[in-house]
Amino acid sequence: MKRVIKSGLIVGVILFVISYGGLFLSIMFFPALFVDYNNPLFNSDGSRDVLFYMHAFIISMALSWFWERFKPLFKGGSIVRGVEFGLVYGMVALLPVMWITFSTMDITVPMVLSWLFYGIVQAIVAGVILSRINP
C-alpha cells in the first residue's frame, strides 16, 4: 500500500502541473470550446473549489491502485504499457461516464469529447510514469 500511495502522490503532482498548464493552453488555443462553460450548470459559489483542485490527486491515487493491481497484464516498454493502460481505463471507466453525463446533462458533444480526451491523456501520462517508477 505504501508503494501505491507514494506512486500516486508523484503522479498527482505531475498531473496537477500538466492539467493546469494544459487548461491555460486550451483556453488560449480553443476559446470557443470554453464559451460553453458560461452556463449556470458550471457556476460555483467557491465553497467546493478545493475539490476541483484535488482532482489530480484523487485520480492519481485511483490509477496508482489500478496499476498496482493490473500491471502484470500490460506488456512491452513503459510507453506501450502506459498507452495501453490509458486506453483500457478510457474504455472501461471514462466512456460509460461520459455517455451517462451527456445523456443526463445539458452539455455539448465537443465538451464531452474534450473531457474524454483529457481523461485518456491523463491516464496515459499516469500509466507511463507508473510503469517507470513501479514496474
Image (tube, rainbow, N blue to C red):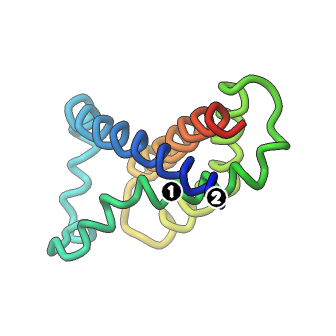
Q: CB atoms at circles 1 and 2 under 8 Å apart?
A: no
Where is residue 61? Give x, y as percent: 54, 57
Local crowd size for mark 2, using a 10 Å CA cut-off: few (<14), some (14–19), many (≥20): few
Q: Gap in Å between the C-alphas at discs 1 and 2?
A: 12 Å
- Near-viewer residue (86 or 117): 86
- Near-viewer residue (63 or 39): 63
Q: Tag 2: residue type?
A: Ala
Q: Quadrant of the C terminus?
A: top right
Where is residue 58? Give x, y as percent: 47, 61
Does residue 43 appear left or right of residue 118 in this picture?
Answer: left
* Residue position marked by numbered label 1 in the rendering: 59
Does residue 128 appear left or right of residue 9 in this picture?
Answer: right
Q: Quadrant of the N terminus?
A: bottom right
* Residue position marked by numbered label 2 in the rendering: 93
Where is residue 49? Give x, y as percent: 24, 67
* Residue at x 56%, y 57% (from the top left corner): 5
Q: Tag 1: residue type?
A: Ile
* Residue at x 36%, y 45% (from the top left corner): 16
- Near-viewer residue (119 or 130): 130
Does residue 120 appear left or right of residue 12 in this picture?
Answer: right
* Residue at x 53%, y 59% (from the top left corner): 98
